[in-house]
C-alpha cells in the first residue's frame, strides 16, 4: 500500500512513507553525530523529483525541528556549549556572506560547478580519511584513546605535541574559558574557524554541520559529546535564519514536505541521541568517517558515470 | 420497353437497398458528442496524478489521435556535459515554445494514421514538436537538446506518446472513441486543451476541441496562497511549527525515558 501526498509549493505528489523514511534516517544521523543532514537529504529529495530550490529550503525547515529536538535532548544532558556556539555562529554568518560572494564570482567565470564539486570531494576525502584513521588508531590503543579527545582530561603535554594549532591558540589575545567544553582559548579562534566553515558551507550549499563537527573535535579540542550538542545548537540558529529568508525572498519552503520530513527526523534525532550515549567517542567517529567517505565515493561515481538525464531543473548549486 | 425499364429500376433499387455501404443510419461526417470526464481535475492534499477519459461518436474513419496539451512556456534547465573525464553542469539551456504538457494517444502509430504534412501542420508527434521548440544555450548547442528535453519530460510523465486509444463499435453500429489520458502528478494548475483528430485513410475528416482544467483545492490552495501572498507570516509559521514539533517529540521521548 502506498499513501501519496501532494506538496503544494513543490507541485509534486510523493509517497508519505518514502518521506518519513528519509526523515527518520537523516534525523537519526543528526542526533547521533550533530550534523544537520542537509548534505544527505537535499540530494535525496532532488532524486525523488522535488525541485532543488524547494528541496534545499524545506530541508532547512525540517532541520529546525530535528535540531530543536536534538538541542533540547543534549542540553538536558549538559552537552551544549552555548558560549562556543555563539562565537562559531558569528564566524559562520561572516563566512557565509563571503562565500556567497565567491560563488557569484565563480558563476560569472563559469567555473562554479567544477569548484563546488571539487570542494565537496576534497573536503569529504580529507575529513573522512583523517577521522577514520585517527579513530581507528584510538580504538586499537584504548589507553591512548582515553587521553585524547573523548570526555576525559587531555594532558597538556599531549595537546602541545598533537597540534601546532594549540600553540597558536595560546599566543592569541582575548583568552576565554569555555567551561562546558573544558578549554581555554582565544575567542578569535572559534570566530575564525566559523568563518572558514561558513565560506565552505556557502560554496557547498549546505549547513556545514559535517565540517563543523570535525573542526570542533580536532581544532578546538572539544569533547565529542559537547561537540554534538553545540553543533546542533549552531545548526538550529542557522536554519531558522535560512528558512525565513527562503520563505520570504524565494517562496520555496514547502511546509507539508517539511512537516512529514520533520516527523521522521525528530523521532530519528531522539533515537540518534540515545544511541550516541551508548557509543564511545571513537566508535561514533569511525561511523561518521565511513559515512562521509561513502558520500564522497557516491559523488565521484556520479561525476564519472554517464547520467540518465542530461537535463536537470535549474537552481541550487 | 416500358416494362423492361421498370424492371431495371426495380433491380437497381433492390441492389441499393441490399448494399450495406449505402444503406444505414444517416451517414455521420463529423465528431459528435465529444466529452472528457472529468472536465475539472481537483488537486487536493492526496492528489497523486489522475486519469481523464475522452469519448466521442466518430464518423467513418481509420484512425483517431487525441492530443492533451498545455500552454507553451519558457523553461530554463541545466545541461550536463563531459569536461575532461567528469560530468558537470556545463550550460544553461533556455527552451521556448514547448508545451508544459504534451500527451498524445492514438488508435495506431501516427505514421499509419496520417502523413507527415498533417502531423507537422497540427503538431502531432515529437517530429512535429521538434520544428516548433526553440533552444538557446549559454554554450554552443550540441544538437541533442531536443532528444534530451523529451527524455527529461517523459521521465516526469509530462510528455508521452502511445497508441492505446480504441475505436469501439456500439450496439447501434456507430463507432465510438475511448481514450484514457494519464494526468501526471507534476501537472501545474492551469487550463489545458484536448484536441481530437479523426482521419480516414490519411485525410483529416474532422477535429474537435475540449477543455480540461486543473485546480488546486482545499489545504494545498490555502498553503500556496499563504506562501505566495504572505511570505513573512508563512516563514515565521513554518519555523514555529517546526520548533513546536521538535520540542513535543523531545518531551515525549524524555517522559518515556523518565518512566523507565
Image: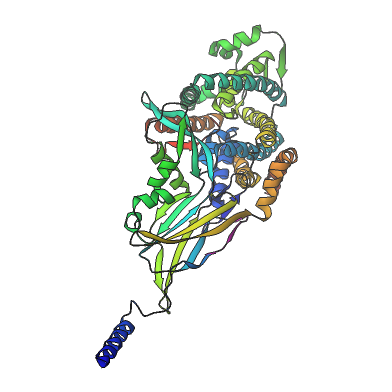
* Residue B50 percent across, percent down from the top left: 53, 58
Answer above or below: position of B20 versus B181.
below
**Which residue lies most toward the front here?**
B1
* Residue A106 visible, this orientation: yes
Left or right of B240 on screen, residue A100: left
The span picked out in magenta is B36-46
**Which residue lies most toward the top here?**
A171
- Identify the residue shown where x is 43% and y is 77%: B26
- Is B43 covered by the magenta stretch? yes
Answer above or below: position of A149 versus A298.
above
* Residue A224 percent across, percent down from the top left: 60, 27
- Identify the residue shown where x is 33% and y is 62%: B201
**Which residue lies most toward the bottom here?**
B3
* Residue A263 percent across, percent down from the top left: 63, 47
Answer above or below: position of A179 versus A28.
above
Which colour scheme appears in the figure? rainbow
- Identify the residue shown where x is 50% and y is 38%: B96
Amino acid at each position: 500500500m502506498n499513501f501519496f501526498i501532494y506538496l503544494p509549493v513543490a507541485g509534486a505528489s510523493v509517497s508519505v512513507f518514502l518521506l518519513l523514511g528519509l526523515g527518520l534516517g537523516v534525523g537519526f544521523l543528526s542526533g547521533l553525530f550533530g550534523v544537520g543532514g542537509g548534505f544527505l537529504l537535499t540530494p535525496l529529495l532532488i532524486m525523488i523529483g522535488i525541485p532543488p530550490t524547494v528541496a534545499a529550503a524545506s530541508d532547512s525547515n525540517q532541520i529546525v525541528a530535528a535540531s530543536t529536538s536534538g538541542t533540547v535532548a543534549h542540553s538536558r544532558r549538559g552537552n551544549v556549549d552555548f558560549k562556543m556556539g555563539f562565537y562559531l555562529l558569528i564566524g559562520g554568518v561572516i563566512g557565509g556572506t563571503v562565500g556567497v560572494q565567491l560563488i557569484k564570482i565563480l558563476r560569472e567565470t563559469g567555473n562554479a560547478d567544477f569548484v563546488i564539486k571539487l570542494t565537496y570531494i576534497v573536503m569529504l576525502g580529507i575529513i573522512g580519511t583523517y577521522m577514520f584513521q585517527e579513530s581507528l588508531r584510538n580504538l586499537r590503543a584504548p589507553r591512548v584513546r582515553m587521553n585524547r579527545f573523548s570526555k576525559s582530561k587531555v594532558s597538556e603535554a599531549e595537546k602541545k605535541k598533537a597540534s601546532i594549532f594549540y600553540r597558536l591558540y595560546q599566543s592569541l589575545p582575548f583568552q576565554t574559558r569555555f567551561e562546558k567544553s573544558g578549554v581555554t582559548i582565544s575567542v578569535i579562534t572559534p570566530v575564525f574557524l566559523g568563518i572558514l566553515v561558513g565560506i565552505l558551507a556557502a560554496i557547498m550549499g549546505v549547513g556545514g554541520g559535517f565540517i563543523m563537527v570535525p573542526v570542533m573535535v580536532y581544532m578546538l579540542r572539544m569533547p565529542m559529546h559537547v561537540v554534538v550538542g553545540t553543533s546542533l545548537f549552531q545548526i538550529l540558529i542557522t536554519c531558522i535564519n535560512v528558512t525565513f529568508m527562503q520563505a520570504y525572498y524565494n517562496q520555496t519552503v514547502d511546509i507539508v514536505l517539511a512537516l512529514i520530513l520533520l516527523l521522521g527526523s525528530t523521532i530519528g534525532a531522539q533515537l540518534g541521541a540515545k544511541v550516541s550515549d551508548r557509543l564511545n567517542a571513537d566508535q561514533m567517529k569511525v561511523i561518521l568517517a565511513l559515512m562521509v567517505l561513502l558520500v564522497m565515493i557516491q559523488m565521484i561515481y556520479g561525476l564519472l558515470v554517464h547520467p540518465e538525464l542530461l537535463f536537470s531543473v535549474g537552481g541550487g548549486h | 420497353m416500358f416494362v423492361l425499364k421498370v424492371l431495371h429500376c426495380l433491380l437497381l433499387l433492390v441492389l441499393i437497398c441490399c448494399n450495406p455501404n449505402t444503406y444505414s443510419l444517416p451517414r455521420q461526417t463529423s465528431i459528435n458528442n465529444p466529452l472528457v470526464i472529468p472536465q475539472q481535475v481537483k488537486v487536493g492534499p492526496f492528489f497523486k496524478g489522475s486519469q481523464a477519459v475522452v469519448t466521442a461518436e466518430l464518423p467513418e474513419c481509420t484512425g483517431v489521435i487525441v492530443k492533451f496539451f498545455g500552454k507553451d512556456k519558457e523553461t530554463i534547465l541545466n545541461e550536463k556535459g563531459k569536461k575532461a573525464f567528469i560530468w558537470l553542469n556545463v550550460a544553461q539551456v533556455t527552451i521556448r515554445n514547448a508545451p508544459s504538457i504534451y500527451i498524445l494517444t492514438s488508435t495506431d502509430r501516427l505514421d499509419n494514421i496520417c502523413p507527415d504534412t498533417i502531423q507537422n501542420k497540427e503538431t502531432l508527434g515529437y517530429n512535429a514538436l521538434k520544428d516548433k521548440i526553440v533552444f538557446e544555450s549559454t554554450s554552443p548547442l550540441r544538437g541533442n537538446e531536443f532528444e534530451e528535453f523529451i527524455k527529461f519530460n517523459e521521465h516526469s510523465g509530462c510528455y508521452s506518446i502511445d497508441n492505446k486509444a480504441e475505436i469501439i463499435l456500439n450496439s447501434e453500429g456507430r463507432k465510438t472513441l475511448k481514450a484514457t489520458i494519464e494526468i501526471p502528478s507534476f501537472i501545474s494548475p492551469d487550463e489545458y486543451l484536448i484536441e481530437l483528430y479523426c482521419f480516414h485513410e490519411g485525410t483529416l475528416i474532422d477535429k474537435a476541441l475540449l477543455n480540461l482544467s486543473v485546480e488546486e483545492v482545499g489545504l494545498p490552495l490555502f498553503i500556496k496562497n499563504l506562501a505566495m501572498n504572505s511570505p513573512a507570516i508563512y516563514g515565521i509559521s513554518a519555523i514555529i511549527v517546526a520548533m513546536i514539533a521538535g520540542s513535543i517529540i523531545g518531551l515525549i521521548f524524555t517522559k518515556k525515558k523518565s518512566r523507565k
